[in-house]
Image (cartoon, grey):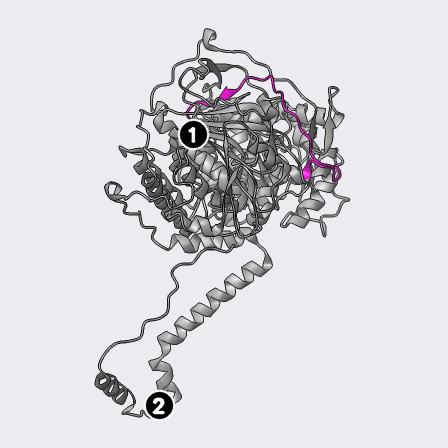
């Protein structure tokens, strides 16, 4: 991406008397030393080492870029950047001089602006935008825009004109990107803007009237004095929602929704209400081609036909309480003046992540002034040009967005002015790696430009998140059941009579939608983590991934396999409302469609699979078994009566211990406290995972009470060559072993699993 570089300048010539230069040269070459190789090598050893390290670093970067391993490169670059100390910008807020308007529009003022980025000649949609009465269109050019671009009724700012406006942000903007709209926002504010409609040139405003659904006026005679339906804050662990479900499309999700939340397709049990007037950011829904990510776009089509998805225009708008977020885009959104500071589009992240990261960042700061986001019924019809963006343009979304939301909800600031909080949050996000220090400097420039064009920062209000949440009484609960409109789901048309495959997916999700899947990956997570979440995230509440090495960019947590059970209690605490927890190794394939008959209130484990669960006598075996047995006896001796009785009834031979390979097991909510208590008894003892898990299970309950669902799993100790299809069976509950270490392996797996879940074929 081409970025402006204003730092280059000609090197300065050294200054000083000619005699001094002559003496220097004479001294420099006066003595000729007789150097042999060993003397030269010892004198220059540090230089040689430095050069070799530099060559190695360049070679590593060249290798990573050419291999195309984006995740590895991202991790490498992130670690390198973290070595550099990020400096907090020093801004003197009281000494910012006004920017003099030198444009031809110095005397032009209007309150309502439509800001678009243009790369081609005016589209029909853009011509229609110009016709909307009472709104001024501002078109922002970039390096791709034709030099003779013109549209009657629109103000056009070319690259050259943008550079002459005197805004600090111009120095940070790429030449060829829509994020140059940041200049347009400042220009509109400088010329009297009170409302800005953030739009693009491929959507038609429905009925040519932005006020049909949007709340263009929040105060005064034209404002709608009404209460607004609001998502319930009843579940404090719920921090992000899919608004498309509310408007009738359960099978579609917006760009920026974490992939682990894609499978949450149930409608709200109930809503609450909030008084209108502070919906400073208003997100519209788009008919035709809604705002969807590349995963949806490339997996939900059976051919090259254009999307034409419709939402319920009669569904009431819905607000989001503090602590809950929604993806916000840059092509169908109205910002009111109190939220103008939140218009800044980040410049250091991938193109299709910029507006989404801006939206989450802005929502968190919006809570500081008592504002909130409202999502509206269809306001725009966008046309699908059948040209989706590549996954690489969204890498910062799928890698970081889930972690970002959690970070933002927990972030707090003690600053006393909004702009100080804005800069502090941008600094924290740079430190956490959500964007680079370039966006931190960009934020400082943006805030100074806002003040320089006359913007007044809003006053702070106390944060509702830190107050005790009032209980939601029966009278405060508002019922609303969304329609279920015809939709495209996984490449299959969903009609009034639900497709058989879709019905299965809904049934699986209904059964396991509140079960957390915990995976341990032995393979390379940078190549498989997203794929595992895509496969199993459709079915389970969420997918937690552990590996031997932590990878924050992929939300992979660190845990050593030998004692991974010691990490499970913190997952239990994180998901207190989950019905149960299913553990799975990445070398075992789970046929989730065969688990429907299992009792989710019972323990599941493959104790009937002889090659997976064995009883080993310590007599005549290695010291390792004897040491493990001694530690088991110590833990058993400390157990409460019911645990100890259960254990001894199952393990009648005191000289034996149970060994379980621990590829798959399930712990229901009612046994979570028992499991945690047993983990605490182990304490610092180094009991292996293969020994601890069977000890815990037979202590918690009698094996005759275990659900036998995993007894039908296919288990081989030695893996077949090349994942032989003869090993796999769609009728088994699980298959072990199966190796997935690359995207190609994952595609092969998906194709063979499609025998049990035909919709999986739409993922490849």
> On screen, 221 above or below 400?
above
Using the image as rendered, state which of residue 296 and residue 22 is in the foreground: 22
Q: Are marks 1 and 2 in contact (CB under 8 Å)?
A: no
Frontmost residue, 86 versus 351: 351
Q: Is residue 75 visible?
A: yes
Judging from the image, what secondary structure is the residue with disc 2 in?
loop
Where residue 209 appears, x then y in whole percent? 56, 24
Left or right for 451, reference 53:
left
Q: Earlier in the sequence, mark 1 or mark 2?
A: 2
Q: Is residue 515 left or right of residue 324?
A: right
Q: What mark, if any, has residue 35 been given in the picture? A: 2
Boundaries of the magenta span? 299-323
Compared across the picture, whether 361 is left or right of 394 comes to left
- Tag 1 residue: 111
286 drawn magenta: no
- Residue at 46 percent across and 15 percent down: it is 224
170 lies above or below 370 = below
x and y, in percent, of residue 329 in the image: 52, 35
Residue 444 in the image: above or below residue 196 = below
Q: CA distance from mark 1 to mark 2?
A: 78 Å
């Amino acid at each position: 991406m081409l970025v402006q570089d204003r730092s280059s300048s000609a090197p300065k010539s050294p200054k000083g008397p000619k005699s001094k230069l002559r003496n220097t040269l004479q001294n420099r070459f006066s003595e000729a030393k007789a150097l042999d190789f060993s003397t030269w090598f010892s004198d220059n050893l540090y230089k040689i080492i430095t050069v070799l390290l530099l060559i190695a670093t360049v070679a590593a970067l060249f290798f990573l870029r050419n291999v195309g391993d984006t995740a590895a490169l991202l991790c490498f670059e992130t670690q390198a950047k973290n070595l550099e100390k990020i400096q907090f910008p020093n801004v003197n807020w009281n000494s910012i001089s006004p920017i003099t308007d030198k444009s031809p529009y110095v005397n032009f003022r209007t309150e309502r602006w439509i800001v678009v980025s243009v790369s081609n000649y005016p589209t029909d949609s853009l011509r229609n935008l110009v016709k909307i009465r009472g709104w001024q269109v501002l078109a922002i050019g970039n390096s791709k825009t034709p030099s003779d671009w013109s549209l009657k009724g629109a103000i056009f700012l070319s690259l050259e004109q943008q550079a002459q406006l005197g805004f600090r942000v111009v120095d940070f903007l790429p030449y060829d990107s829509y994020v140059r709209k940041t200049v347009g926002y400042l220009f509109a504010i400088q010329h009297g803007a009170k409302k800005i409609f953030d739009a693009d040139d491929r959507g038609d405003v429905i009925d040519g009237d932005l006020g049909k659904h949007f709340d263009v006026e929040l105060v005064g005679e034209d404002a709608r004095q009404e209460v607004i339906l609001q998502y319930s804050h009843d579940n404090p662990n719920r921090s992000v929602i899919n608004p498309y479900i509310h408007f009738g499309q359960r099978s579609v999700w917006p760009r920026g929704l974490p992939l682990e939340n894609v499978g949450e397709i149930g409608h709200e049990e109930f809503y609450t209400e909030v008084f209108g007037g502070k919906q400073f950011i208003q997100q519209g829904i788009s008919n035709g081609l809604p705002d969807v990510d590349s995963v949806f776009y490339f997996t939900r089509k059976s051919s090259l036909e254009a999307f034409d998805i419709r939402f319920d225009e009669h569904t009431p708008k819905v607000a989001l309480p503090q602590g809950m977020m929604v993806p916000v885009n840059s092509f169908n959104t109205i910002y009111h003046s109190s939220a103008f500071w939140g218009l800044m589009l980040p410049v250091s992240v991938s193109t299709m992540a910029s507006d989404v990261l801006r939206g989450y960042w802005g929502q968190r700061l919006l809570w500081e002034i008592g504002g909130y986001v409202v999502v509206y019924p269809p306001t725009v019809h966008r046309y699908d040009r059948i040209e989706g963006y590549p996954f690489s343009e969204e890498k910062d979304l799928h890698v970081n967005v889930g972690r970002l939301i959690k970070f933002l909800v927990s972030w707090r600031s003690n600053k006393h002015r909004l702009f100080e909080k804005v800069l502090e949050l941008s600094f924290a996000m740079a430190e956490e790696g959500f964007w680079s220090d370039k966006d931190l400097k960009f934020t400082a420039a943006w805030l100074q430009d806002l003040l320089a064009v006359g913007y007044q920062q809003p006053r702070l209000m106390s944060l509702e998140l830190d107050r005790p949440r009032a209980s939601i009484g029966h009278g405060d609960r508002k019922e609303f059941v969304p329609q279920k409109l015809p939709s495209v789901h996984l490449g299959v048309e969903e009609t009034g009579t639900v497709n058989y495959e879709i019905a299965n997916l809904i049934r699986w999700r209904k059964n396991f939608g509140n079960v957390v899947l915990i995976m341990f990956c032995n393979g390379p997570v940078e190549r498989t983590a997203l794929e595992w979440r895509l496969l199993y995230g459709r079915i389970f509440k969420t997918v937690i991934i552990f590996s031997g090495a932590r990878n924050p960019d992929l939300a992979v947590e660190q845990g050593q396999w030998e004692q991974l059970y010691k990490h499970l209690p913190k997952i239990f605490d994180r998901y207190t409302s989950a019905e149960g927890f299913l553990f799975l190794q990445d070398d075992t394939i789970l046929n989730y469609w065969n688990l429907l008959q299992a009792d989710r209130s019972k323990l599941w484990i493959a104790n009937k699979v002889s090659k997976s669960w064995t009883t080993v006598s310590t007599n005549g075996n290695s010291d390792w078994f004897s040491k493990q047995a001694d530690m088991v006896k110590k833990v058993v001796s400390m157990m409460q009566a019911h645990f100890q009785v259960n254990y001894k009834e199952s393990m009648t031979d005191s000289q034996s211990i149970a060994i379980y390979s621990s590829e798959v097991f399930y712990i229901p909510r009612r046994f979570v406290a028992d499991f945690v208590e047993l983990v605490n008894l182990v304490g610092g003892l180094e009991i292996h995972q293969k020994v601890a898990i069977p000890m815990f299970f037979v202590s918690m309950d009698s094996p005759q009470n275990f659900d036998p669902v995993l007894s039908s799993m296919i288990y081989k100790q030695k893996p077949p060559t090349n994942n032989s299809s003869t090993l796999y069976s769609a009728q088994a509950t699980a298959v072990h072993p199966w190796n997935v270490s690359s995207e190609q392996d994952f595609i092969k797996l998906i194709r063979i699993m499609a025998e049990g879940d035909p919709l999986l074929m739409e993922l490849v």
